[in-house]
Amino acid sequence: MITEDIRRGLIPESISSFSDLHDFIDTNLYLVDDNITPRLGSFFNWSEFWLDDEGIEIDIYAVHQLLNLMFEALDYWLENGRKMNAAEYLNIKDT
C-alpha cells in the first residue's frame, strides 16, 4: 500500500522513514483497511493473543510488540530504498 501511495503521488518518492509518513498520511490507515481482503485478518481473531477462551480479553502487550516489529521492518525498508519486500526486513536489527 505504501508503494502504491508513492506511485499515486500521495507520498514523495524520497520518503526514508516510517515516522516521516505521518507528515503525508494517517499511517493507521495502513493497519485497518476494510477494502482489502486481509491476508492475516484482525489480531482480535488470532487466538494466540487471547487471554481467555472467548477472545474477549486480548494481550495488548503482545499486540504492541508485534506492531513495533512491523513498524521497525517498514522503517528499515524505507531507509534502504524499498529494496526487496518489507517483510524481509522483519529480522534485521540495529548493530
Image (tube, grey):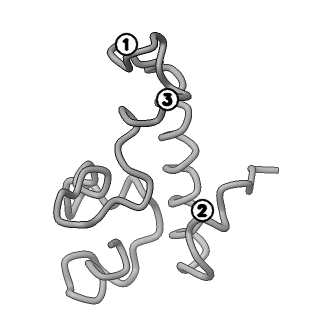
Q: Which amino acid does label 3 sit on?
A: Ser
Query: Residue at horizontal 47%, vertical 29%?
Result: 64
Please state if 38 lies on the left or on the right of 91 as rendered.
Answer: left
Q: Examine the rendered structure and indicate whether residue 32 appears above or below residue 10.
A: above
- Among the 4 quarters of the image, the one containing residue 80: bottom right
Residue 78 drawn at (x, y percent): 51, 70
Q: What residue type is labelled 1?
A: Glu
Q: What element carries label 3?
A: helix
Residue farthest toward the bottom in the current orientation of the protein: 7
Estimate the spatial distance between the alpha carbons at disc 1 and disc 3, rounded to whole Å. Answer: 11 Å
Mark 1 = which residue? 57
Question: Earlier along the polypeptide chain: callout 2 or callout 3?
Answer: 3
Q: Where in the figure is residue 25, as x and y percent of width and height? A: 20, 61
Q: Residue 76 carries which label?
A: 2
Is the residue marked by circle 3 packed among few (<14), some (14-19), or many (20+) residues within 10 Å?
few
**Which residue is at 21% across, 87% downward?**
8
Q: Residues within 10 Å of mark 2 (few under 14, many from 20)?
A: many
Q: In this view, does 14 lie to the left or right of 11?
A: right
As measured in the structure, the alpha-carbon distance from the residue carrying label 2 to the one carrying label 3 is 29 Å
Which dot, 1 or 3, sits closer to the camera? 3
Image spot of residue 33 (x, y percent) = 22, 58
Q: Is mark 2 on a helix, strand or loop?
A: helix
* Residue at point 35%, 72% (across, down): 2
Which secondary structure, mark 1?
A: loop
Q: x, y percentage for residue 6?
A: 30, 82
Q: Mark 3 points at which residue?
A: 47
Q: Are marks 2 and 3 in contact (CB under 8 Å)?
A: no
In contact (CB < 8 Å): disc 1 and disc 3: no
Q: Which residue type carries mark 2?
A: Tyr
Quote the CA–CA distance across marks 2 and 1: 32 Å
Comparing 79 with 87, the one in front is 87
Closer to the camera, 57 or 6? 57
